[in-house]
C-alpha cells in the first residue's frame, strides 16, 4: 500500500473538506471552493469531491493540493500527514516509487473518465438520433416508410437499453460495453457523411 493509499484509507473526503472550512450538507452538497459558487454545486462522496459546475473531480489528495495550491501530490500527502497526525513513514525511495505509482493511476483514471464522458455522449446522441427518426413515421398507410424510421423501429429499444445500462453500470460493465459504443459512434459518423 502506497502512502497515497494510506492517506485515502485514513481520511474521508468529508473530513478533509470540513477541515478546510467547507460546510457540508446532509446530502453531501457544498459550495465549490474552486469557482465562484453561490449555490452548492459540488458533491462530497466518501472518497471523491465532484463539482457539477466547474467539473473538478478529485480525491482527498487532489483536493488538498488544489485547495492549498500545492505543486505536487506528495506535498498534499505531507500536509495531510502533519494536519491529521497520521504518522506515515515518508522516506526517500518509497516516496519516489509511490509518487510514480500515484501519477500513473491518476493518469489512467483521467483517461477512463474521459472515455466514460465521450461514451455517454455517443450513446445518448445515438438514442436521440433514433428518437428523432421515429418521428418520420408515414402520415398515411399509402405512404412508403422512410428507411430511417424503419431503422429506428428496429434499434430504438436497444439504444434505450444501452443508455440505461451505461448510467447504472459499474466501471467494469461500462468497459465491456466499449464495442457497442464504438458501433454507435461509427453509425453516427456514417450519418454525417
Image (cartoon, rainbow, N blue to C red):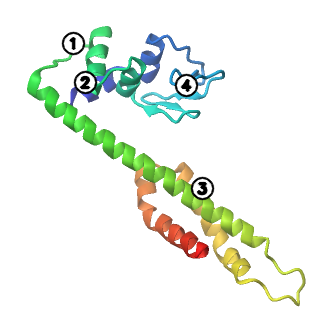
| Contact check, label 3 and label 1, Cβ < 8 Å | no
Q: Earlier in the sequence, mark 2 or mark 3?
A: 2
Please name the residue shown 57% across and 34% down the image.
52
**Which quarter of the rendered picture does the N terminus lie within?**
top left
Quadrant location of residue 71? top left
Are there few (<14), some (14-19), or many (20+) residues within 10 Å of tag 2?
Answer: many
- Look at mark 2 in the image and give the residue it sits on: 74
Eyeballing the image, is 60 above or below 101?
A: above
Q: Nearer the viewer, residue 11 or 72?
A: 72
In front of the other: label 2 or label 3?
A: 2
Query: Element type at marker 3?
Result: helix
Please name the residue shown 21% across and 32% down the image.
99
Q: Earlier in the sequence, mark 4 or mark 2?
A: 4
Whole-angstrom CA distance, mark 3 to mark 1, is 45 Å
In front of the other: label 2 or label 1?
A: 2
In front of the other: label 4 or label 3?
A: 4
Q: Nearer the viewer, residue 179 or 69?
A: 69
- Look at mark 1 in the image and give the residue it sits on: 87
- Look at mark 4 in the image and give the residue it sits on: 35
Is residue 83 shown left or right of residue 146? Answer: left
Please name the residue shown 54% across and 71% down the image.
189
Eyeballing the image, is 100 above or below 66?
A: below
Residue 148 position in % (x across, y down): 70, 79
Query: Element type at marker 1?
Result: loop
**Which quarter of the rendered picture does the C terminus lie within?**
bottom right
Q: Earlier in the sequence, mark 2 or mark 1?
A: 2
Are there few (<14), some (14-19), or many (20+) residues within 10 Å of tag 1?
Answer: few
- Look at mark 3 in the image and give the residue it sits on: 164
Is residue 72 shown left or right of residue 91? Answer: right
Amino acid at each position: 500500500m502506497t502512502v497515497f493509499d494510506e492517506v485515502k484509507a485514513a481520511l474521508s473526503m468529508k473530513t478533509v473538506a470540513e477541515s478546510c472550512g467547507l460546510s457540508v450538507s446532509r446530502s453531501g452538497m457544498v459550495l465549490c471552493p474552486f469557482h465562484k459558487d453561490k449555490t452548492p454545486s459540488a458533491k462530497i462522496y466518501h472518497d471523491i469531491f465532484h463539482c457539477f459546475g466547474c467539473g473538478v473531480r478529485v480525491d482527498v489528495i487532489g483536493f488538498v493540493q488544489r485547495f492549498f495550491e500545492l505543486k505536487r501530490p506528495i506535498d498534499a500527502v505531507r500536509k495531510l500527514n502533519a494536519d491529521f497526525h497520521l504518522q506515515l513513514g515518508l522516506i526517500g525511495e518509497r516516496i519516489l516509487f509511490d509518487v510514480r505509482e500515484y501519477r500513473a493511476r491518476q493518469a489512467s483514471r483521467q483517461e477512463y473518465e474521459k472515455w466514460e464522458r465521450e461514451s455517454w455522449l455517443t450513446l445518448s446522441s445515438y438514442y436521440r438520433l433514433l428518437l428523432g427518426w421515429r418521428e418520420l413515421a408515414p402520415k398515411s398507410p399509402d405512404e412508403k416508410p422512410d428507411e430511417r424510421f424503419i431503422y429506428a423501429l428496429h434499434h430504438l429499444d436497444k439504444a434505450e437499453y444501452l443508455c440505461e445500462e451505461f448510467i447504472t453500470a459499474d466501471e467494469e460493465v461500462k468497459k465491456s460495453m466499449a464495442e457497442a459504443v464504438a458501433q454507435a459512434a461509427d453509425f453516427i459518423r456514417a450519418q454525417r457523411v
